[in-house]
Image: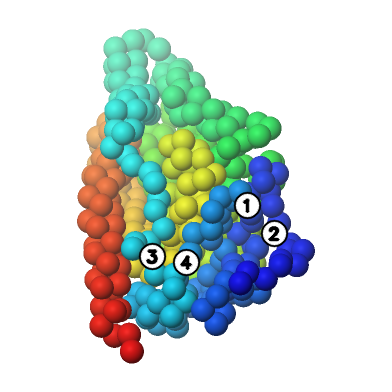
Amino acid sequence: MMQAPARQSTDLSRTGRPSLSSPRPSMSGGRHSLSFSRRKSGNQETLPDGRSASAPPVPTLPITEDGTTEQNISNASSMGIIEPGPPPLDYSLRVRKWSILIFWSLVFADSVAMPIALYFGLFYGTSLSHNTVFSISTAALGGVSIIEYFLRFWRLWKKGSTCRAIGARRAYLDWFHWNYSFAWMIIMIELIVGTIPKEPPIRLLSMPVPTLTFAFGVELLIVDAARLMGMRAPFRISSLPQGAPLRPGIYSIIEDIIAVDGSGGTEFRERFNARYNASHYFRQMLHRLTLFWAVPACLIAGGTTAVIFTVPKDVAYVIGWTVPFAWAAIWALITTKWVQISLRDEHRHWAESREKEPAAAP
């Protein structure tokens, strides 16, 4: 029988949703218990499943030290909470494929094609000074991205926001938005410094995208290395509160982009957290995805930079603004297919483990 709950410190956010710092219910003696504890999978302490207070609880399987799903199923079986599959994400890119295609086509035209077109069109087709050419190019850059920046700021800032990070205050926004701000700061510094001289340094003006690519890869590597060393979050990282065990570097990026830009909302953040807590296979996939993006990002940035400072200036400018984007597009397509296959494998592995359990039961 469910015991009467004592007054719990659930640390609800202003939207009425639980914080990730609130502990997760444990199971005791085959019955639900209102005592709370943390569990570990490998070096990961699990956090609460992030469900809203009004939503029905999603049972998450206890994780053993080796993190095996089979053992999770076995332990859950004795408690009578075996689930047919991991907690659902309830999010699909298929229904959003046209909006994704339109958005990234606009970004490509605005942030790749236009700088190159303005460079060659104004540099060689007019009598404008070279400084004026790059001043115009800098002023015209990134209109779509800037609009998106302020739109996502409003979605996170407005009262009653439905996409805010779990347990975060209004002013926090989210981790990706702070990275977004930092990225624009880097771009503006490089472009403004590059347009000050009478004869702009074209190689420097070719560097904004490789610089961002390098910063992106290094951040992912640092976060994942700190996680593997057992370090805890030194400050809030989206829904992950300060002091919580770190998660793979790409976790917060996926969470923030889908929740805000992809209209998944805070509910997706909660489901994403529940899935991460419950599934060792899912955590492993995110770790591999982090390395899949981080290491090539650093290599692409380094290689592009080396080429920029060795080839003719016109070629360098084209390479600097196109190669990182082309790499990211190819990696995004590979990632989409990889994740689809991995999620199918996860469900199959979960189902196979569940089918083995009746035979193993005494």
- Taking the spot 30% from the left edge, 20% from the top edge, the residue there is 117
Mark 3 and mark 4 lie on one chain; the one further toward the N terminus is 4
Of residues 98 and 356, which is closer to you in this image? 356
Identify the secondary structure beneath mark 4: loop
Of residues 1 and 88, which is closer to you in this image? 1
Measured as percent of width and height from the top left, residue 283 is found at 40, 65
Identify the secondary structure beneath mark 1: loop
Residue contact at pointers 3 and 2, CB within 8 angstroms: no
Residue contact at pointers 1 and 2, CB within 8 angstroms: yes
How many marks on residues?
4
Type of amino acid under label 3: Glu
Q: Is residue 265 above or below residue 220?
A: above
Mark 3 and mark 1 lie on one chain; the one further toward the N terminus is 1
Badge 1, how many Cα within 10 Å: few under 14, some, many 20+? few
Measured as percent of width and height from the top left, residue 225 is found at 46, 70
CA distance separating discs 4 and 2: 18 Å
Identify the secondary structure beneath mark 3: loop
Mark 3 and mark 2 lie on one chain; the one further toward the N terminus is 2
Type of amino acid under label 4: Thr
Mark 4 and mark 1 lie on one chain; the one further toward the N terminus is 1
Badge 3, how many Cα within 10 Å: few under 14, some, many 20+? some
Of residues 151 and 145, which is closer to you in this image? 151
Q: Which residue is mark 4?
A: 60
| Front position among marks 3 and 2 | 3
| Front position among marks 1 and 2 | 1
Q: Which residue is mark 3?
A: 83
Is residue 348 toward the left or the right of residue 239 in the image? left
Q: Which residue is mark 2?
A: 10
Type of amino acid under label 2: Thr
Disc assigned to residue 53? 1
CA distance separating discs 3 and 2: 25 Å
